[in-house]
Image: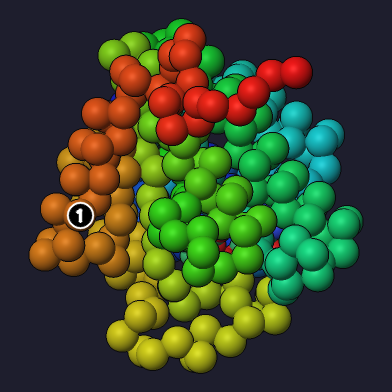
């Protein structure tokens, strides 16, 4: 019989990298798991290891999250399986060039995987969790959400979108039992770099975090119920982030007005 206290986490992009470490840590915390990605050989191997090491129930759902039908199938799992209390929206990709130099099909795939899929999965999970009055969503964004000038605008834009979505969901549903955390990693040593034709070793070593440290730190932020967790942001620089949020808050009530600002006045109408 299923332990009524056992919770299940669904982790996308669990076959390697950040998602695989989340799967490991969550199984050790007592979660049963549903692992989602395309590479079933890797997912099966991880599932077998975690079953043996933790005794948890670990299942695999193969999905290409750039394909609408596969996204719908994972959304259906989130909607139908009441044991699921946590969605880790982790699957993501980068691209080799920028908007002007990347083939259109690759840009479309990036948006499908980094925006459309996590949005629709958060929708399915969020509805189910709010209906039950409890549940959590972790969205893996990136520090590039804050520094668009540092990278190609398409990838960083998808991560800014996830940060925006997370903060909005947290504000609107936080008091209805839904906890949403955006995690903003900096450069982290995973396959995403090689997959997008980039060399993570081109960064100074002190800029690149290990995937184990990244996930362990992000889970400290999860336990603290932070809305935004930035593992590489040193405590000394935290006031900059807090000031940025506070300044943003100060703008909230003054951004929609009948009259254009005085500095834009003066253009004569015909
Ligand atoms: P990774 O090592 O390349 O792993 C990506 C994961 O996503 C894999 O499990 C991959 O599995 C899965 N995935 C890729 N395409 C998919 C598709 N079409 N359908 C389903 N799953 C797919 O990358 P990572 O660094 O762990 O990245 C995880 C998340 O962290 C991403 O959202 C990334 O943007 C974000 N992030 C990473 C860094 C970094 O420096 N590493 C920094 C900031 C944010 P399959 O190939 O088996 O499908």
Camera-side residue: 69 or 53? Answer: 69
Camera-side residue: 195 or 16? Answer: 195
Name the spot of residue 246 as percent of width and height, x first. 21, 36
Quadrant housing the C terminus: top right
Q: Secondary structure at mark 1?
A: helix
Name the spot of residue 35 as percent of width and height, x first. 58, 49
Give the tally of numbered discs.
1
Name the spot of residue 181 as percent of width and height, x first. 36, 39
Residue at (73, 36) in percent of width and height: 71
Residue at (38, 50) in percent of width and height: 183
Which corner quadrant of the image does residue 212 belong to?
bottom left
How crowded pointer 1 is (Cα within 10 Å; few <14, some 14-19, many 20+) is rated as few
Q: Is residue 165 visible?
A: yes
**Is 102 placed above or below 252 here?**
below
Camera-side residue: 230 or 133? Answer: 230
**Is 163 placed above or below 235 here?**
above
The response on whether ligand 1 sits within 8 Å of label 1 is no
Name the spot of residue 85 as percent of width and height, x first. 42, 28
Residue at (72, 47) in percent of width and height: 111
Ligand 1 rendered quadrant: bottom right
Quadrant housing the N terminus: top left
In the figure, is residue 176 to the left or right of 66? left
The residue pinned by badge 1 equals: 240
Q: Is residue 83 visible?
A: no
In the figure, is residue 236 to the left or right of 149? left
Residue at (54, 41) in percent of width and height: 161
Which corner quadrant of the image does residue 45 belong to?
bottom right
């Amino acid at each position: 019989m299923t332990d009524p206290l056992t919770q299940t986490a669904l982790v996308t992009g669990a076959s390697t990298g950040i998602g695989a470490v989340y799967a490991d840590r969550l199984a050790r915390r007592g979660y049963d798991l549903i692992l989602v990605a395309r590479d079933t050989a890797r997912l099966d191997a991880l599932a077998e290891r975690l079953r043996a090491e933790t005794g948890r129930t670990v299942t695999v759902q193969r999905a290409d999250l750039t394909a609408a039908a596969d996204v719908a199938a994972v959304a259906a799992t989130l909607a139908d399986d009441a044991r699921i209390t946590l969605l880790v929206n982790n699957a993501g990709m980068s691209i080799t060039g920028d908007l002007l130099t990347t083939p259109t099909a690759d840009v479309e795939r990036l948006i499908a995987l980094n925006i459309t899929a996590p949005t629709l999965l958060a929708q399915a999970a969020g509805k189910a969790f709010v209906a039950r009055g409890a549940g959590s969503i972790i969205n893996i964004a990136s520090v590039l959400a804050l520094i668009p000038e540092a990278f190609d605008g398409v990838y960083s834009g998808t991560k800014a979108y996830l940060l925006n979505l997370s903060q909005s969901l947290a504000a609107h549903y936080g008091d209805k039992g839904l906890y949403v955390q955006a995690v903003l990693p900096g450069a982290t040593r995973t396959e995403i770099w090689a997959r997008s034709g980039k060399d993570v070793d081109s960064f100074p070593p002190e800029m690149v975090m290990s995937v184990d440290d990244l996930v362990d730190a992000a889970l400290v932020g999860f336990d603290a119920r932070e809305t935004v967790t930035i593992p590489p942001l040193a405590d000394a620089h935290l006031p900059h982030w807090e000031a940025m949020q506070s300044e943003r808050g100060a703008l909230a009530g003054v951004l929609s007005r009948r009259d254009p600002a005085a500095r834009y006045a003066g253009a004569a109408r015909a």
